[in-house]
Amino acid sequence: MRSLPILLPAALINARACPLASIRQVRTWRLRFVEQVPDDLARPAGWSDVVEAGATARDDGAGPSWPTELAGDGFRALWDAPRPVSGPVRLRGELVVDPLDGLATTGRIHRLRLVTQTVGEDGAGERVVACSTRDLSAVPKAVDAGDRGVLVDLELGVT
């Protein structure tokens, strides 16, 4: 089974911009890749920040970003590349649900986890971010302010 972790952001859940979903349902999600600066944030098991795909420029962008299609092992996503890119890429970031501009990827929901971030300071005054998860049986109708969203593990290759 090929599993793909995608983030359903809290803002989309609270705006009810995506259909509710539960475990074992087959759903099509529109995905966007969002680059992240590598950080020390511990991610939940199975949530990698590395994406490998083939990149194809959509058209001649005119900075500051170039619309690029990513095609990986069973998924497609739109990426605002910082420069023109084509061919194989290895990127750091997240696949995020974007119902307006993302590219369609279909899969069976294997697992749902509510992702909560806690921000604090250590003894030296440095910002510390902790990430915790809680298993869900369905995407909630709303999430709290400290919640980042729902991590959806999709089983790919299912129609």
Image (spheres, rainbow, N blue to C red):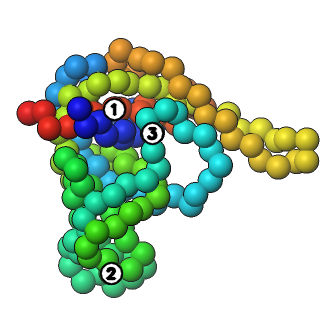
Q: Amino acid at mark 1?
A: Asp
Quadrant that contains the C terminus: top left
Asked whether 77 or 19 is in front, the reply is: 77
Image coords of residue 65 (percent x, y): 38, 75
Which residue is at a point 45% across and 18% down the rendered structure image?
135
Mark 1 lies on residue = 153
**Which of the marked residues, 3 or 1, is nearer the chain's N terminus?**
3
Residue neighbourhood size for the residue with mark 2, other residues' Cα within 10 Å, grouped as few (<14), some (14–19), many (≥20): some
Q: Which quarter of the picture shows residue 54?
A: bottom left
Image coords of residue 123 (percent x, y): 91, 41
Q: Is residue 25 above or below residue 130?
A: above
Which residue is at a point 91% across and 47% down the rendered structure image?
124
Residue 84's disc number: 2
Asked whether 123 or 148 is in front, the reply is: 123
Residue 65 seen by the camera:
yes
Q: Secondary structure at mark 1?
A: strand
Q: Amino acid at mark 3?
A: Trp
Query: Residues under labels 2 and 3: Cα distance?
Result: 27 Å
Q: Amino acid at mark 2?
A: Pro
Image coords of residue 78 (percent x, y): 28, 60
Quadrant that contains the N terminus: top left
Mark 3 lies on residue = 47
